[in-house]
């Protein structure tokens, strides 16, 4: 089966995280959807006829399953990573390696959860790393690269992130004041971002459509409406 025919088949990176876990749920809720393969460090107790968990050592990864779409929601924090090198490993090197292998295997679309403000020239190491990943993925020439740039993600996390919680509370409190160019900084539900990821994979990339799409708050919300 070629990458452009039959049901869309997805690889999910970051499937145990705030956005990734919800993306998997929405992929599996689609009765017309195809196989979903999650690349994980540890198996979970999740079960579904179309769900496959592939336990991998990302340091030794040499191949990925055949798929049409890759959904990437992997990420960490500087505090959790412990160093810039460890942070870059998770937020840049692993996603890029998976993307390279998936592209070689015939994947046509890559959907990335990045961050508002991401830029390869950003002063912030965090935002610079995100921006560098976006540029590296664009060079792989997928038929379509969809970059979602949310601000603070609202939702129940398994891990504690006090600084982020404060940021979310602030963003919610002043959200109504964020108009015009500031709207992109509004907090957004992790489930909305997950639904937007899935909606982006609803059909094969269209000929003549922009090869790289960068979506911020309002565009993410609009795209997410396509998935119940």
Image: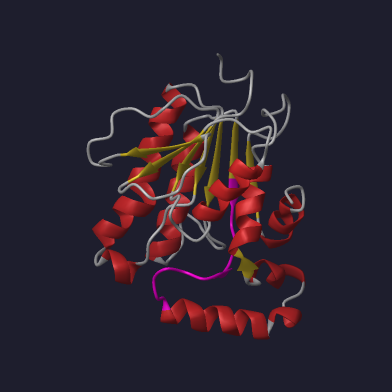
Quadrant of the rendering where the N terminus is positioned: top right
Q: For the view shown, which residue lies furthest in the top direction? A: 1
Number of numbered markers: 0
Secondary structure mainly formed by the magenta segment: loop
Residue 153 falls inside the magenta stretch? yes
The residue closer to the viewer here, 216 or 163, is: 163
Q: Is residue 123 above or below residue 197?
A: below
**Position in image of residue 68 (x %, y %):** 55, 28
Q: What range of the chain is rendered magenta? A: 147-161
**Position in image of residue 197 (x %, y %):** 61, 47
Q: Is residue 164 above or below residue 134?
A: below
Colouring convention used in this rendered image of the protein: secondary structure
Question: Which residue is at 30% across, 47% downward?
Answer: 41
The residue closer to the viewer here, 68 or 208, is: 68
Question: Which residue is at 70% across, 79% downward?
Answer: 175
Q: Is residue 60 left or right of residue 117?
A: left
Q: Quadrant of residue 150?
A: bottom right
**Position in image of residue 225 (x %, y %):** 76, 53
Residue 179 falls inside the magenta stretch? no
Q: Is residue 202 left or right of residue 113?
A: right
Q: Is residue 139 above or below residue 221?
A: above
**Position in image of residue 15 (x %, y %):** 45, 50
Question: Which residue is at 64% across, 44% downward?
Answer: 29
């Amino acid at each position: 089966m070629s990458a452009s025919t039959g049901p869309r088949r997805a690889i999910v990176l970051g499937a145990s995280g705030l956005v990734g876990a919800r993306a998997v749920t929405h992929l599996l809720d689609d009765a017309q959807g195809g196989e979903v393969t999650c690349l994980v460090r540890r198996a979970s107790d999740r079960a579904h006829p179309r769900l496959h968990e592939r336990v991998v050592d990302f340091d030794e990864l040499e191949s990925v399953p055949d798929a049409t779409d890759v959904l990437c929601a992997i990420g960490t924090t500087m505090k959790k990573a412990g160093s810039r090198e460890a942070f870059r490993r998770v937020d840049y090197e692993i996603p890029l390696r998976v993307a390279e292998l998936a592209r070689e295997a015939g994947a046509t679309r890559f959907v990335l959860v990045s961050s508002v403000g991401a830029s390869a020239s950003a002063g912030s190491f965090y935002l610079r790393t995100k921006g560098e990943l976006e540029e590296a993925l664009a060079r792989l020439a997928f038929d379509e690269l969809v970059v979602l740039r949310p601000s603070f993600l609202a939702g129940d996390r398994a891990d504690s992130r006090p600084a982020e919680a404060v940021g979310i509370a602030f963003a919610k409190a002043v959200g109504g004041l964020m108009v015009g160019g500031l709207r992109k900084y509004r907090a957004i539900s992790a489930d909305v971002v997950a639904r937007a990821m899935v909606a982006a994979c609803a059909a094969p990339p269209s000929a003549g459509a922009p090869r790289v799409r960068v979506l911020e708050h309002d565009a993410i919300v609009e795209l997410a409406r396509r998935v119940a």
